Image (spheres, coloured by chain):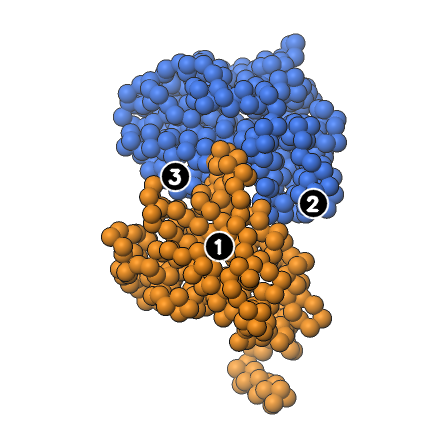
Amino acid sequence: MISQNALHHAEKCRFCFMCRHLCPVQLQTGREINTPRAKGLVLSMVSKGAEAYDQAMAQTMYECLLCDACVNDCATGYQPPIYIREARTEAVVNDIAPAEVMALIENIEATGNIYGMEKPSFAQNGEEILVYLGEVASCKEEGMVKSFLQLLQKAGVSAKVLENEPASGAMLGDLMGYVDEVVQQAKACTAAINQTGLKTVVVLDSYDVQIMKQKYPEWGCEIQADVITATAYIAQLLESGKLQVANVNRGLAACHDDDRLARTFYEFAPIRAIAKAAGFEVTEMFNKERLAKSCGSAVALAYMPKIVTQIAAGRWEDLMRTEAKIMVTANPQAYLCLSQAIPEGYQLVDAYTALLSNLK
Amino acid sequence: MFRILVCVKAIPNTTEVSFDADGKLQRSSAELQWNVADLAALEAALTLRTPESTVTVLTMGPQKLEMPLKELLARGADEAILITDKSLAGSDTYATARVLAAAVEKLGGFDLILCGKQSLDGDTGQIPGMLAAALNMTCITNTENLAVSNQQCALDRILEKGIQKLTLDLPCVVSVQPYAYTLRLPGIMAMRKAREKTVLMLNTQDLDLSPETCGQSGSLTKVVKIHPMRHGHRNGPKEADLAVGTARILTLLKEVK
């Protein structure tokens, strides 16, 4: 039951091959089926009844990071993630999604996060802003969370963190497409945020920002507060002088542009401002800003660790083409993926921790 | 049990349509999609639904609409009915309304009948009124904010210069503004259940309709020809001088005459 809209995106490819050269999954696996255009062709054949949608096809639909690199460069302006998400929905409905994916969905149903673990609490009762950490940062990147909250404290910002932070729906949306179950998560998350009455929500994970700002309004989920990325908020604190930094040179570094921030919100400057304030001299990788190559996502890392580790290694290769030995990121999912493949002699730096250590 | 019926129409993808040599719309060559205003009407019905009510979707069209109707079942409709019969081809709004009315009478017992304000292909907006007339019911068009209680329907009717707040006795026919409601997404379990459901298929015999009342022979109007619009056509250069421009328009009008 792929929608006509999704098929429209799948069937209008004019084979210009641009996405073939950009897709981080295809670049690492070298498999033609991993290009967005091949996935579109497969779905088109299925819709015409020429092929059955089987487990092997479903598997390939999950070999995609939904990073939007193909969307950014599509000559015809079509959006492969639309049909890939619907193909995932179809796979889940038909019970042909990979077992690893189904296990993650079951974890979300049981615990609210893909890891199936009790989420550590970072609850605070501030009164100025609400910080939304997201499940990856909470469960896997404790260091980044603590550094970020300490930065806010140093700047004199009174921040609230929810005791039982509900999932935004971003993870479930990547795993099973945009279905009612995801909308229900979005509604619960909106209600929890609105209940605080705070007028600013600072969101640490760009995957959560993307769904909150792009999809929530479509689903009638109205967050009654300004939603701002953590990077943009910290950059504002630096600009306003609420965070004062020491004049230290920590060497040459390149910033990894988080794909969802860069391509959805065109946000590139704040991460560079933070890296510079942390004492780094910033150089650029060739694939930067809107052309940034994805280094993987936490959800993809959980169901296809081998491929995502290869993809992260590919991002490190981009750094190796510069003179820098340090990669800076402020995204918990990027940090998690990049940390799987750090080459010898290179260093991965969490922007918040680096900035914290460079405050006056 | 409170029963809501939603009339939906599958229309050709407006960016894909083509015309034959006579300028007639080639429906078979185009992808079909549900009319946006009808999906809004379905969402209005789902919003009104309580545990004591049901929502039925009804459409008239080719047999290939069975799967798209199941998509509407996944979105929340309780049952789906497809009136499909080759003799219905070429129906105008009058003939269509008569067929829909026959189905409503055959199935019986609907408390509220919802339609989209108008379809994107025909764009007439005539079906709600004609259907109501055939069923001898009240019809209010172009509405939003529907609510039902005590066998009455309260709603806002959108007028050119304001909003009219009305309360109608049920049963009645109401047409819904296309952007008043956004149809909800289906859930995984709902999609699984929808695939197991059956779409009720009806033909003209089931509805006791004679061939002369259906299709082109039962229609009061006939599309003779569709003339494609010519875009970007301009006769001569742009005139900056008012007097020269006016004189040129007069000349052109005389030529046309």
Q: Is residue A346 left or right of residue A350?
A: right
Q: Name the quadrant containing residue B249.
A: bottom right
Which mark, residue A221?
3
Instruction: Give the label on residue B127, or none.
Output: none
Report the mark closest to the observer, 1 or 2.
1
* Callout 3: chain: A
Using the image, determine if residue B86 lies above or below residue A329: below
Q: Circle 1 sits on which residue?
A: B58
What is the C-alpha distance between the residues marked 2 and 3? 36 Å
How many numbered discs?
3
Q: Answer above or below: position of B255 versus A63.
A: below
Can I make out residue B5 in this image? yes
The amino acid beneath tag 2 is Lys
Q: Which chain is the one coloured blue?
A: A
Chain in orange in the render: B
Q: Chain of mark 1?
A: B
Residue sticking out furthest to the left: B150
Element class at badge 1: strand
Query: Looking at the image, can residue B178 be seen?
Result: no
User: Do dots 2 and 3 share one subunit?
Assistant: yes
Three-letter code, disc 1:
Leu
Relative to B44, residue A202 above or below = above
Residue at x 55% of width, y 81% of height = B241
- Where disc 2 sits, the SS reads loop
Please state the horizontal and vertical placement of residue B121, each as a whole percent of the image.
55, 63
